[in-house]
Amino acid sequence: MTMVSKEERLQQQDNQILRLQKEIEKLKKSIKVQKYGLVWADVPEAFEDDFENKLPVLEEVPRLAIKNKDGKPTHILIEGDNYHALTCLNYTHKGKIDVIYIDPPYNTGEDGFRYKDKRILDKFPDGTEVPKDHPFRHSYWLSFMRKRLELAQTLLSDTGVIIVHIDENEVFNLGLLMNEVFEEKNSLGVAIWNKMNPKGDALGISVMHEYLLCYAKDKSKFITQKDTLLKRKENAEKILNRAKSLYNKLGKKIIPEAIKEVIKPFGYSQTKLKEFEVEYTLELINKEFQNWLSRQNFSGGEKAYKYIDKNGMVYRGVSMAWPNKETAPNEYFQPLVHPITGKECPVPKRGWRNPPETMRSLLERGLVLFGADETNQPERKYLLKDNLLENTSSVFNYAGSDDDLLELLGISFPYSKPVNVGKFLLSAIHPNPRIILDFFAGSGTVAQAVLELNEEDKDKKSRQFILVTDNENKIMSDACYPRISKIINGYEGSTPTGGSLRYYKTGFVGKHNILDADDKDRVQLAYHAGEMLSIAENTLEAIEKTGYWQIFESRDRFTAVYFREEYDELDAFVEKVNKLKKPASVYIFSWEDDPFVADFEDSPGVTVKTIPQPILEIYKQIYNLI
């Protein structure tokens, strides 16, 4: 047995104390830098070689444009890697997008999700599918999504929202990631799409739903808009039309529907049938209306509108009791007097929901429902025509597919999201989106949803979509573009939606990346920025191009671009712009931040900006996200 001296024991104790002190310091530092959230091995992504060494731009493919002079929006389709496209859009549309609606890869291990791991690649091949048992499966997916969501976040307007489809494979990871990118305080909640068709090959619980994660850019600003997170009562029009049809019978002598069904087999003569006629009263109308409602597959909220009043209005009664656990203020306990008996009606235990002045207003407008006598507590009268919207709930049911539609369109594409799901979500979250972006466009479901909504909604026909997808497996050339073209121009058995489309591809200029760009790269960027600038200004029709400038037009304005570093033709350009008969955004090449405002002081409708430095500044901010 080896004896340990006193000095050795003391030294061991000192070493142990030192180790503990170091461990404490390490923990203190980690507490300072770590926070609650998602931690994963952030794997760098190998972008295309061009992106590593050049500057991204958008270039139009004019032959694929669809032009209709019908006054409807011109939409934008971009072919290319969505990271590259989002980079360009951060210049053209930063802070302008109202709704981003995406259906990213779910990372199931079988959905074809690929990731190019920059750490292990000398070159940049197409990548391989990430199998379910890959050790970096979730890290690859999260690394892929984070970069794109960060770019998406800056595109949203202050009142904008993002809606993301996902299934059980990544829903929990995605929720934490979006809390980090968009901040948890801006979450609008999680919706469940119930497909009503459970998976038959499940080894655990059979899944029959997907998730939809919804976040606002700034929830406090989003909710100040009118009608946010409200959906249209699906069957309201059917209910109102049925009520109108029945009310038109008031005072007429007609055979009731129920009796018609009973006597139909007997083949009575017209004279005999007269004996079954009755005069329609409001009571009979309501009875038939309620019988009809009871047979419909409507929601409980819709079926609650089961009464027709003397003016033909459909209504329901709703409690006017104070909704909180705490008792209402004293003035909220003033009793209502029954209009027939003249006696006071019962007051709710905790008081009325509304103050006395509101109650008086409701009485004056005939919006208080009294019972047969004063023993019944009065209710608020809600007219269906004034309450066509209801809160968007956390669950919605839709079991259909678009397989037949895609077959009719001649398009082969697996797992396409139904158009009706897209239309529902684009209508039930944001009250009035003007610009809608989908950067996982797939077969173009979102485009069709927007085009159809523009046709169906009389008050909101100006929605514009921007779709982005690459052409892997010819998804753009064989699915997305042909589908959009057929929806706009019409296909067998359909009515054309109209509208126009511009087709762009991501491209690259210069010889250096964003951080190392030299003067030659800046010149090249300015030469090729015209189409990006036209997108930024939504003036998509190119009407003139010389060796020095370009001019683009929309219905109400122009965009003029002087892209040369030499100013030989600047005077001619200024003269040209000053003769334009609509407001114009003017971009001029400048090595300095010199907007050339004095040249256009006689044209009050002209706004002057410089290129290419503002584009590079946006790109530099993005580059640091890689």
Image: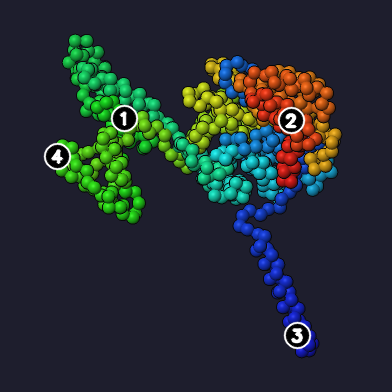
List the residue tagged with mark 4.
341
Residue at point 49% right, 34% down? 431
Q: Disc 1 and disc 4: Cα gap in Å?
A: 26 Å
Q: Earlier in the sequence, mark 2 or mark 4?
A: 4
Please report contact status of discs 2 and 1: CB closer than 8 Å, yes or no.
no
List the residue tagged with mark 2.
596
Please report contact status of discs 3 and 1: CB closer than 8 Å, yes or no.
no
Please report contact status of discs 2 and 4: CB closer than 8 Å, yes or no.
no
Q: Disc 3 and disc 1: Cα gap in Å?
A: 90 Å
Give the secondary structure at mark 4: loop
Q: Could you tell me which quadrant the C terminus lies in?
A: top right
Q: Is residue 54 above or below residue 499?
A: below
Q: Quadrant of residue 113?
A: top right
List the residue tagged with mark 3.
10
Q: Where does the image place residue 397, in percent across and percent down from the top left?
A: 47, 36
**Amino acid carrying mark 4 in the image:** Thr
Q: Could you tell me which quadrant the N terminus lies in?
A: bottom right
